[in-house]
Amino acid sequence: MADGRFYLTTPIYYVNADPHIGHAYTTIMADIVARHHRQLGEDVFFLTGTDEHGGKIATSAEREGRTPREHADLLSARFRDLGGVLDASYDFFIRTTDPEHEAEVQRMFQALHDSGDVYRGSYGGWYCSACEAFYGEGDLLEGRLCPIHRTPVEWVEEDNWFFDLPAYRDRLLAHYDANPDWVQPQARYNEARRMIELGLEELSVSRAQVEWGVPVPWDPEQTIYVWIDALLNYRTALGYARPGEDLVARYWPPDLQLMAKDILKFHAVIWPAMLMAAGLELPRKLMIHGYVLKGGEKMSKTTGNVVDPFPFIERYGIDALRYYLAREVRFGEDGTFTAEGFEGRYSQELANELGNLLNRVVSMVGRYRDGVVPADAGDEGELAAEVAAAVEAARGSFARLDISRAIEEVWRVVQRLNRLVEQRAPWTLAKDPARAGELDATLHALAEGLRIVAILLWPVIPGSAERVLAALGQDPAAVALERAAWGAGAPSARVAPSGPLFPRVEEAAA
């Protein structure tokens, strides 16, 4: 951002079941964005974590023979472990059972009560226990089924505390109209604005029948509605993420908040209204991504169609999964995960087009120039211009959060370099001493093009990009975007042959 800092959040993941590809997708995409902004030299704070309160977790824990706390500890650790496996560079992992979070939630909730925005009332509505949310009659599927989980809802009546959401309708609409790109993509902006335009209902913000939660400070017989508790994490984390340091002034408001489309209303309607009520600045942008589908349906524990990411990571490596999800699923749209598609991207693009290209370049520099990349003779102006154009195009795509398009721009350079190998045929040039200059120019162009490719791909496949740089004799930490310029590499670099970047994977035994 213009102020040189960038605060990015994922939704905090609900710990009622093990993580799946959908969770991995959100974390990976957030990490790609965070890494890109670090490449720009910005002060990045990347927050993720787990949502651990609510009746659904208590029910899941009882079913497994655990206490809610034991259940939350176990599942939260699995989500934290997944972040590590995904090579996610988050700065803090928040848990809503953190005592610091709970105390701040109570303080902020008390302030909303003191201002008159939270008041006592009675409520009856159709409730989905899986969503932990109420639905209007018109929102339900035929047969009174939850629109998300397609399971029966139940009628629930309670005396609770309420938030005066309708009071913020006009302010919300004014904010949307003044910030037409506040929610992306445009279809989600339109959807959220339409929710507000059609009218808002008072929001029940406490539960009388749910014990596993943060107690309402002035009414300990009730707990704060899990969604209110969860949304406030984006603010509370900054108060204790770094012991002894208050990060609120440094990072608030969030520059970008990522989430899937099923929680659009909570983030694009309820969350900004809560912040308005508290007198806090709103996030600068919300990015709503689609679902990663299997068999045409959203993956979920409820429907039983989840894809476990770990076997793919174990077999192909984490960068292969990061690449496939970022390349295959256009950010903001639904996309389908298939094993066949994954294997195709891996073998054709990663192993063949990128991995084999690196192997050939390093081998040829070693064979024909004793392992030292020749100096730039200045004869590759046309190629240098093509690469510079690709850098700018990729950078623009990243800025628009069009990650798939950014990868496409980089991949054009990969394919261009592969064509250069075939067109120039360095093995032929090496046989003719009179063409030594052409061979030098070719080898330098290939190495320099690959170096820039590695920098551009670093947010997506960080470990592999660093291996490319190391193999080319470059500093693997030199990934700042300003170094993605022709001629910015270390001169007279000595290549360092290594094993295959993306090894061939044999077909699994039937």
Image: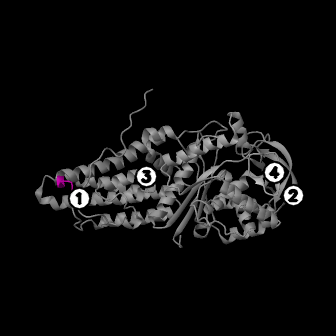
Which residue is label 1 attached to?
Answer: 373
Per the model, the C-alpha gap separating discs 4 and 2 is 12 Å
The answer to whether residue 264 is visible is no
* Crowd tier of the residue under label 2, counting other residues whose Cα lies within 10 Å: few below 14, some 14–19, many 20 or above: few
Q: Is residue 502 left or right of residue 426?
A: right
Q: Is residue 142 left or right of residue 493?
A: right
Which residue is label 4 attached to?
Answer: 222
> Label 4 sits on what residue type?
Gln
Question: SS class of the residue under badge 1?
Answer: loop
Image quarter of residue 507? top left
Instruction: Please state the extent of the stretch shown in magenta in the rendering.
Output: 368-372
Q: Of the two numbered discs 4 and 2 on the same chain, state the one appearing first in sequence.
A: 2
Which of the two discs, 4 and 2, sits closer to the camera?
4
Which residue is label 3 attached to?
Answer: 461
> Which residue is at the front of the view, 59 or 147?
59
> Label 3 sits on what residue type?
Ile
> Label 1 sits on what residue type?
Val
Residue 466 in the image, given as x and y percentages of width and height: 37, 54
Find out whether the residues at labels 1 and 4 contact each other: C-beta distance under 8 Å: no
Q: Of the two numbered discs 4 and 3 on the same chain, state the one appearing first in sequence.
A: 4
Q: Of the two numbered discs 2 and 3 on the same chain, state the one appearing first in sequence.
A: 2
Q: Is residue 369 magenta?
A: yes
> Label 2 sits on what residue type?
Arg
Which residue is label 2 attached to?
Answer: 120
Say which quadrant the C terminus sits in.
Answer: top left
Which of the two discs, 2 and 3, sits closer to the camera?
2
* Crowd tier of the residue under label 1, counting other residues whose Cα lies within 10 Å: few below 14, some 14–19, many 20 or above: many
